[in-house]
Image: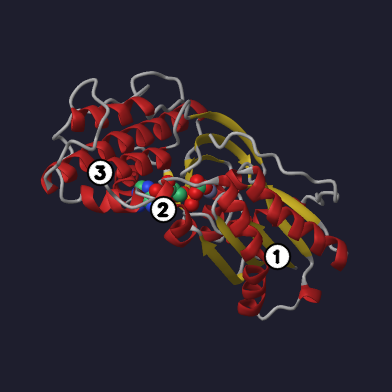
Amino acid sequence: MIVFTLESTCDETAAAVVTDELQVLGQAVATQESLHEQFNGVVPEIAARAHLERILPVMQLALERAHVRLDQLDAVAVANTPGLAGSLVISLMAAKTLALVLDIPLVGINHVHAHIYACQIAAQRNVYPCVGFAVSGGHTSLFDCEAPTKLTLLGGTIDDAAGEAFDKVGSMLGLAFPGGPALSKLAEQGNPAAYSFPRSFLKEDRLAFSFSGLKTAVRYAITGPGKVDLSSVTLTAQQKADLAASFEAAVVDCLVGKALQAIQQTGRRVLCVGGGVAANRLFRQHLQTAAEKHSIELHFAPHSMCTDNAVMGALAVERLRLAESDSLDLDVIPGLMR
Ligand code: KG4
Ligand code: ZN
């Protein structure tokens, strides 16, 4: 069975051709970073318009790379939740059109659940049941995953997502958007103990995250307590690296600590981590060490599948196996990207 998967939840336009054996026949991703860079964040209207321009060429490219024709497709899948309404609707309309014209099933999938499913695609074997952890620019969510499409939210962030915090602190340090990868690189030169930043909820049982206090703490470390204007401050290269390293260490402590608590509270022995921040070097290292210590089977999404892509939409295969599909009334559910 050949499934065509589409993704436009935020600022990546992506398409992939996958099989029910989880083989990737071809894929394409168009990023929009250059369009949003000057605003230090994703502008929904700009994202929606860019998706509209890119969706057809991206679909075409994925099919060409897969050497698959439209009439060979058995189903079309689309991430219809969560995300930006104007972005989601572009790939949903494209998917519905294909489903109608080719008379094939339409399968809606949850983008956050798909980030976790990336671990299954990489492992090429069943990794469920597990604790699933989606850590990206839009979400920091822990799930108890009974099966690929049977997830219960255990907890998540009450304010910023981890990636969002990386991007905002990156911007404070003068790094280009999205700041996560650059901040992580800068942190390699810094001292993680130079600044003592807060680790919210870490000593509590509650599976929750909060990064807004941490962001403010970084700002005050730069400007001085109670001051918000960054423009009058000049930091040395070492100060910047120390701030980056201390910030990254605080985020990673929270992510690792809560992932371990989720394992303890659920009794699961397998942990699957996906999303853009799952590409973070320090996070991967620290979680690996903790997993070995606590005998947890740890799966990270491979780097190529951490940030948004359509390959992880192979999650649709799991719904098709259960004989599930959607009608052409399927709608977008923007929802909260927590
Ligand atoms: O999964 P993703 O592409 O988008 C959402 O669904 O939100 O994740 C993008 C996020 C951005 O915030 C980016 O800064 C962050 O992932 N990110 C990283 C790293 N690589 C990407 N954050 C920290 N360290 C990294 N190496
Ligand atoms: Zn994502």
Q: Position of residue 84 (x, y in %)?
A: 61, 43
Label 2 sits on a secondary structure element that is helix
Q: Which residue is mark 2?
A: 37
Instruction: Identify residue type, mark 1.
Output: Phe
Q: Position of residue 101 (x, y in %)?
A: 86, 66
Label 3 sits on a secondary structure element that is loop
Gap between marks 3 and 2 measured at Cα: 15 Å
Q: Residue at x 40, y 33 (%)?
A: 260
N-terminal of the pair, mark 3 or mark 2, is 2
Q: Is residue 112 above or below residue 338?
A: below
Q: Is ligand 1 within 8 Å of the beta carbon of the residue shown at mark 3?
A: no
Residue 298 seen in the figure: no
Instruction: Identify residue type, mark 3.
Output: Leu
Residue in front for this viewpoint, 195 or 34: 34
Q: Which residue is mark 3?
A: 173
Q: Which quarter shows the N terminus?
A: bottom right
